[in-house]
Image (tube, grey):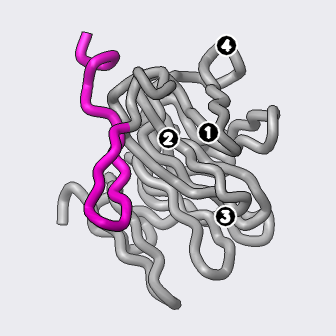
Amino acid sequence: PESTTGPGAFRLSPGGIITRVGVNEGLPSGRVYALAEGVDGSLWFGTSGGLSRWLDGRWRHYTTADGLRANRCFTVAADPSGGVWVGHGGAGLARVEGERIRYVTAPDSLASQYIWHVRIDAANRVWVSTDGGVSVLEADTWTTFDGRTGLRSARAWPILPVGNRVYIGTRGG
């Protein structure tokens, strides 16, 4: 299947040297959807086969066997306290800290369980784009922005916090 033979991720080194990181190099899948760097220098890979961390020359893979609700990890963001946020499309949003995986649930916190993008801003707020709008975690409190608060289309995809603004890409304009 393509997920085990797909292209993977590539590293561009000084001098223009390109190195592949895929199944042969230790990833559970060659289909890589997201990348992030942790505060400890770890590299995180969101793949169709799970979430993988590369640190000190070793892989650690997280899958449904470890507590992920789905192996397909569409978005990954590392926060300053060492945690990593991972979104699964329709399977929700998780925070991985060490060996612990904790899920955030909608509707108490998130606009939707369909997670498309996660970003951490300079103030350490967690921004999450979903099928139902954008949710932000600040000081242990979730706030949602959707059609009721002025977001023209609730189906949000890419999100980019820049300074005191947040740019949101939507399906409907």
Distance in Å between CA atoms under marks 3 and 1: 24 Å
Residue bearing the label numbered 4: 65
Q: Is residue 54 left or right of residue 16?
A: right
Question: Between disc 2 and disc 3, whose residue precedes?
Answer: 2
Question: Between disc 4 and disc 2, whose residue precedes?
Answer: 2
Residue that appears at 30% across and 66% down: 15
Question: Between disc 3 and disc 1, whose residue precedes?
Answer: 1
Residue that extends furthest to the bottom in the rendered view of this protein: 164
Distance in Å between CA atoms under marks 2 and 3: 23 Å
Residue bearing the label numbered 3: 137
At label 3, which amino acid type do we have? Leu
Residue that extends furthest to the left in the rendered view of this protein: 173
Can you say whether 52 is above or below 83 in the image?
above
Residue that appears at 52% across and 26% down: 50
Residue 21, percent across and down?
40, 36
- Label 2 close to label 1 by CB (< 8 Å): yes
Sort mark 3 into few (<14), some (14-19) or many (20+) by Cα contacts within 10 Å. some
- Label 3 close to label 1 by CB (< 8 Å): no
Residue bearing the label numbered 1: 53
Distance in Å between CA atoms under marks 2 and 1: 6 Å
Which label belongs to residue 45? 2
At label 1, which amino acid type do we have? Arg
- Label 1 close to label 4 by CB (< 8 Å): no
Distance in Å between CA atoms under marks 1 and 4: 16 Å
Residue that appears at 61% across and 17% down: 64
